[in-house]
């Protein structure tokens, strides 16, 4: 079968097309013929071995996200049938319940081989059906970015109608957060570096926007949007440089979902604010299969359509990564297998 793999050494320059023997499912496993993949910022971090030994060993098939058709079943598999369309789960061992170390350390696209592969063998328990209305490329966007936004806003933070939600940027996680926060009836503010992207965010339903490049003190500007009360929920992807501002515009008792550290991972924020405002700083790392299934029911019921920026062919993985690195995309970058 055809794969892409990082071989020899880490880095974008070591990504190569290759062939591996066709895999066969063992007891309790199934075989997927992959039809689409999508890229996440995390895949760039993996390429540079950014998660240390958690990233895994070479050669490694990259990308955590994808969708495929079930083409063979191993002995004893009953929960999924031949021909069904499923996503392999980002954490195949995390079915339900609380995260624990064993559930969080086995993830696709590092240390486990990822979705840039013609076929994948998965434990039958580590996949989930996707909404019928979505194309393969749209469905391939769900396992990491969508589930992270879903878990932040509905499982770890509970968004209620009329609440004020602040979302940072217009990346993969942010666009799903905007769609889900709207679906839950929240008032949504999005900050972005680009006026062009802001126009598209408004078209998607953002109630208020701030260009954080033109307004570096966006905490003050966004706080005014809430009438001085502050945000009930903030979706944090910036980390070091954005958390101090988030702490200035969260309401007392509000939740800051810590999802990314795009501007650095050091803690430079005033912990006094966390204490005196009783702020909940909530780390979020993707989610369980159970959360994924609940999210898919909501997507199907409310007709949520993932935003796809561009679809590349299987052998165009390098240009797809270049587009991700450029930061100019709006929506998910996908691969058609
Ligand atoms: N914890 C988890 O489970 C999990 C899951 C998924 C992603 N993540 C992390 O979350 C982050 C975002 O991932 P992604 O896949 O959504 O990335 P992405 O699609 O590459 O989006 C990045 C976007 O973030 C915005 N941004 C960058 N720096 C910013 C800043 N200083 N202030 C505000 N916004 C800023 C930019 O939006 P504009 O262009 O509009 O300015 C940029 O386009 C990454 O750090 C990733 O590793 C974590």
Image (tube, rainbow, N blue to C red):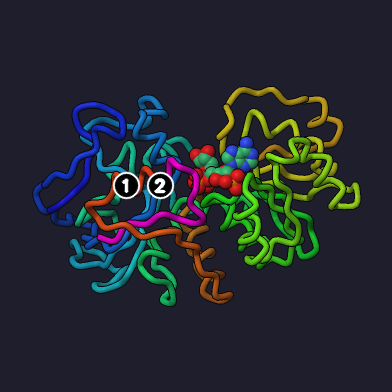
Please state which of residues 32 and 102 is positioned toward the viewer in this rendering.
Answer: 32
- Percent x, y of residue 95: 44, 53
- Give the magenta-colored segment's residue range: 324-337
User: What residue appears at the point 51 percent right and 55 percent down from the top-left corner?
Assistant: 330
Q: Is residue 259 magenta?
A: no
Residue 283 seen anywhere in this rendered image of the structure: no
Q: For the residue labelled by badge 2, is the local secondary structure a helix, a strand or a loop? A: helix
- The residue where tag 2 is placed is 323
User: What residue appears at the point 73 percent right and 44 percent down from the top-left corner?
Assistant: 255
In this picture, residue 256 sits left or right of residue 19: right
- The residue where tag 1 is placed is 319
Which label sits on residue 332?
Answer: none
In 3D space, how far apart are the residues under numbered discs 2 and 1 (Cα atoms)? 6 Å
User: What residue appears at the point 46 percent right and 51 percent down from the top-left corner?
Assistant: 144
Ligand 1: image quarter: top right
Q: Does the beta carbon at disc 1 come under 8 Å from ligand 1?
A: no
Q: Kindly indicate whether the residue at mark 1 contacts the one at mark 2 (C-beta within 8 angstroms).
A: yes
Q: How many marks?
A: 2
Q: Does the beta carbon at disc 2 come under 8 Å from ligand 1?
A: no
250 versus 77 height, above or below: above
Decide: few, some or many residues near mark 2? Use Cα within 10 Å; few <14, some 14-19, many ≥20: some
- Percent x, y of residue 83: 25, 74
């Amino acid at each position: 079968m055809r794969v892409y793999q990082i071989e020899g050494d880490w880095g974008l320059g070591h990504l190569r097309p290759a062939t591996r023997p066709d895999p066969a499912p063992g007891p309790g496993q199934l075989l997927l013929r992959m039809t689409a993949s999508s890229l996440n910022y995390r895949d760039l971090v993996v390429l540079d071995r950014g998660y240390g030994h958690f990233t895994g060993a070479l050669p490694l098939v990259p990308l955590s996200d994808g969708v495929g058709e079930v083409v063979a079943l191993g002995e004893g598999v009953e929960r999924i049938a031949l021909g069904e369309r499923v996503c392999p789960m980002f954490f195949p061992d995390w079915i339900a319940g609380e995260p624990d170390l064993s559930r969080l350390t086995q993830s696709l696209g590092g240390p486990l081989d990822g979705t840039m592969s013609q076929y994948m063998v998965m434990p039958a328990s580590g996949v989930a059906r996707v909404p019928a209305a979505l194309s393969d490329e749209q469905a391939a966007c769900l396992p990491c970015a969508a589930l992270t936004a879903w878990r932040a806003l509905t499982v770890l933070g509970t968004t209620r109608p009329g609440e004020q939600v602040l979302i940072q940027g217009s990346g993969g996680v942010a666009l799903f957060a905007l769609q889900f926060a709207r679906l839950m009836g929240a008032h949504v503010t999005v900050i972005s570096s680009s006026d062009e992207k802001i126009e598209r965010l408004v078209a998607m339903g953002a109630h208020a926007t701030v260009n954080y490049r033109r307004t570096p003190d966006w905490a003050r500007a966004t706080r005014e949007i809430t009438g001085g009360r502050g945000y009930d929920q903030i979706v944090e992807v910036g980390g070091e440089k954005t958390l101090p501002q988030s702490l200035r515009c969260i309401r007392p008792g509000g939740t800051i979902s810590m999802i990314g550290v795009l501007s650095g991972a050091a803690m430079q924020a005033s912990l006094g604010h966390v204490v005196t405002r009783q702020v909940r700083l909530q780390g979020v790392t993707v989610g369980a299969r159970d959360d994924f299934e609940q999210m898919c029911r909501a997507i199907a019921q409310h007709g949520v359509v993932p935003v796809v920026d561009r679809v590349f062919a299987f052998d165009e993985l390098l240009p797809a990564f270049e587009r991700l690195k450029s930061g100019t995309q709006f929506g998910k970058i996908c691969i058609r297998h």
